[in-house]
Amino acid sequence: FSTVRFYHPKVIEHYQNPRNVGTMDKNLPNVGTGLVGAPACGDVMRLQIKVNDNTGVIEDVKFKTFGCGSAIASSSYATELVKGMTLDEASKVKNTTIAKELSLPPVKLHCSMLAEDAIKSAIKDYRTKRHNRKPTLGPDA
Ligand code: FES
Ligand code: FES
């Protein structure tokens, strides 16, 4: 059956048991949402992070991907990878790390690129929201 022929076992494993599938409320102040698409194939990936405002640590991650097996596996693995990282660490995650873990063939490299872009986009969204937040009552309010 063709899946077996084209996909590495690690891809199939993530595809069949995807980690951290789901949705978080994107309006929560400490949730960053990344939504990216691959123009070449039309696949779409949404990745969300919940960040501890004080430590900058990503405490929870959820994803939803409409795409090929490699894109689903890449996002599933990406959620495992960045959970527990600081924003700075997560922003350095490279698609090659994901592609290597899943043994993606060259034609599927852009699927892991989608995951890298989704992480970066979620971080950017969180940082923008945080920057725009109304200052709360502080010592000199
Ligand atoms: Fe069809 Fe990615 S090209 S799902
Ligand atoms: Fe396009 Fe996998 S084929 S993301």
Image (cartoon, helix red, strand yellow):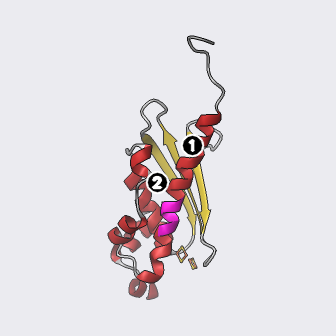
Instruction: Please give the name of the residue rendered at 52% of the width and 54% of the height, measured from the top-left corner.
Output: 120
Q: Is residue 3 above or below residue 28?
A: below
Which numbered disc, 1 or 2, marks the residue that appears first in the sequence? 2
Q: Nearer the viewer, residue 111 or 13?
A: 111
Mark 2 and ligand 2: say if the CB distance to the nearest ligand atom is below 8 Å.
no
Q: Is residue 15 above or below residue 80?
A: below
Quarter that holds the C terminus: top right
In the displayed structure, does residue 106 sit left or right of residue 136?
left
Q: Quadrant of ligand 2?
A: bottom right
Disc sitting over residue 20 in the figure: 2
Residue 64 horizontal/vertical position (percent) = 56, 59
Q: Nearer the viewer, residue 90 or 51?
A: 90
* Type of amino acid at the residue the image marks with label 2: Asn
In the displayed structure, does residue 118 sit left or right of residue 87?
right
**Residues packed near mark 2 inside 10 Å, few (<14), some (14 to 19) or many (20 plus):** some
Q: Magenta includes 115? A: yes
Disc sitting over residue 126 in the figure: 1
Residue 24 appears in the figure: no
Read off the magenta span.
113-117
Q: Secondary structure at mark 2?
A: loop
Q: Magenta includes 24? A: no
- CA gap between label 1 and label 2 equals 19 Å
Question: Furthest residue to the front?
Answer: 140
